[in-house]
Image (spheres, rainbow, N blue to C red):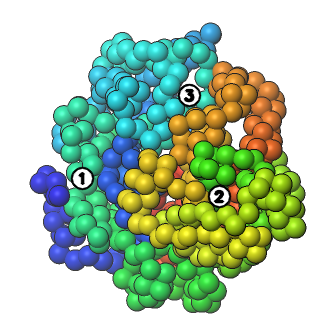
Amino acid sequence: MTNLKLTAGAWALMATTALAGSDAITLGMVLEPPNLDPTAGAAAAIDEVVYANIYEGLTRFGPDGAVLPGLASAWDVSDDGLTYTFTLREGVTFHDGTTMDADDVVFSLDRARAEDSTNAQKALFKDIESVTALSPTSVAVKLSAPNGNFAFNMAWGDAVIVAPESIDTAATAPVGTGPFSFVEWAKGDHVTIARNDAYWGDAPALANATFKFISDPNAAFAAMMAGDVDAFPNFPAPETLAQFEADPRFNVIVGSTEGETILSTNNKSGPLADVRVRKAIAHAIDRQDIIDGAMHGYGTPIGTHFAPHNPDYVDLTGQSGFDPEMSKALLAEAGATDLTLRLMLPPPAYARRGGEIIAAQLRNVGINTEISNLEWAQWIEQVFKGKDFDLTIVSHTEPADINIYARPEYYFQYDNAGFQALIEKLSVTSDPAMRTELNKEAQQVIADDYVNGYLFQLAKTGVANAKINGLWENAPTQANDLTGVSWSD
């Protein structure tokens, strides 16, 4: 579906799918988003297109993970920590020309926290008691309990500001306030965006950008080499990076992500409800073999659901070290012999390649697997929403998201009242030292319960034309932020 309000630059872009030069860029992406509404979808690929480009929130993440002003130029917190008053920027309009004001903020936050909300991160808004427009440029958000992370929560892609006039078409023709506006979505091939000349902030250097979907690693390599794409921020063929490093036409950009890559386990699926079986699975896994075999050495082993670059990280990899004999003993103790589990794999290479390696490792301790390769939309419906699975492999790329383990309805269905109380305490704690201790305790609890098989922190391995500047090295959130991207002469 195409937005009919196209700029002159956008019409020019539609004449070709890959313009090279000083004001256009084509980026490769492995996965095509199932829709383009970040407030109603769980797929990381949505934010990879729209975050900071089309849509903006009250706050936003910078390339170093810092929380920065967004549509709110400033905010104040009441002494009791219960009320956040946001000052909105003046003169901001949506891409359809309508004004963005306090009423849109009220609409967006009320919609996200509503009982029938389909927001994938609805927990971000659970503490909101009321949202009130004090004036066109001032909004008060009252919380039911203090939340020192609230400004951080508002920086997520799930918390962007939308308008009632255009929300019904957000899935296919998004209308935001960002520096780029939506042009077209050619399903199965690409999404095109163009510079928003009415943008309230600094104009981006790029006039046009195309996100081209290339899931096959070999095709991605060929597209980069041929110049059909200018950059591939999350390159799916790490085994070829050495060739790009040796070619002066390219830069290889290696950084870190927030992506905890895990063997997600359905904690309510038959024998997997037994912690001894989950522990056996954890000890059957050789993380380094998976990192080497699926990621060609790119990735940092993890033993819990927390990013190693976070100062609060605890290295618990030794607690679930590779020990197949222990796995066999635990399975025998649990009476789980001749076990067959369904392993559902989404499209990314880390899942498909890693799944084959894990299946072989599990087979060595007496666990058979039935592998099903799912397309992304099918994975969302069957695994994430339907909870119809035993095991799956996925990278959780949302920042600082250990709180998902406090949601019994979440897809791996972990229900621990003590952990839920711990996260509730964390959510109302603002003292940094106390937050550190609570974060460490939370990591230990889920490691002790062997909720999932913790594999590795996903590395950000990107390739770009050497003349491109401003692409993010690290990924503090799932985004291809083009606001600072430009070409060198």
Q: CA distance from mark 1 to mark 3?
A: 29 Å
Q: Earlier in the sequence, mark 2 or mark 3?
A: 3
How crowded pointer 3 is (Cα within 10 Å; few <14, some 14-19, many 20+) is rated as some
Q: Earlier in the sequence, mark 1 or mark 3?
A: 3
Residue at point 59%, 86% (across, down): 240
* Nearer mark to the viewer, of 2 and 3: 2
Q: Secondary structure at mark 1?
A: loop
Residue at point 24%, 38% (across, down): 167
Circle 2 is placed at which residue position? 262
Q: Position of residue 34 (x, y in %)?
A: 34, 57
Q: Secondary structure at mark 3?
A: helix
458 in relation to 244, above or below: above
Circle 1 is placed at which residue position? 172
Circle 3 is placed at which residue position? 150
* Nearer mark to the viewer, of 1 and 3: 1
Does the residue at mark 1 contact the one at mark 2 (Cβ under 8 Å)?
Answer: no
Q: Earlier in the sequence, mark 1 or mark 2?
A: 1
Give, as a three-letter code, the residue at label 1: Thr
Quadrant where the image shows the N terminus:
bottom left
How crowded pointer 1 is (Cα within 10 Å; few <14, some 14-19, many 20+) is rated as some
Q: Position of residue 375 (x, y in %)?
A: 41, 66
Give, as a three-letter code, the residue at label 2: Ile
239 in relation to 259, above or below: below
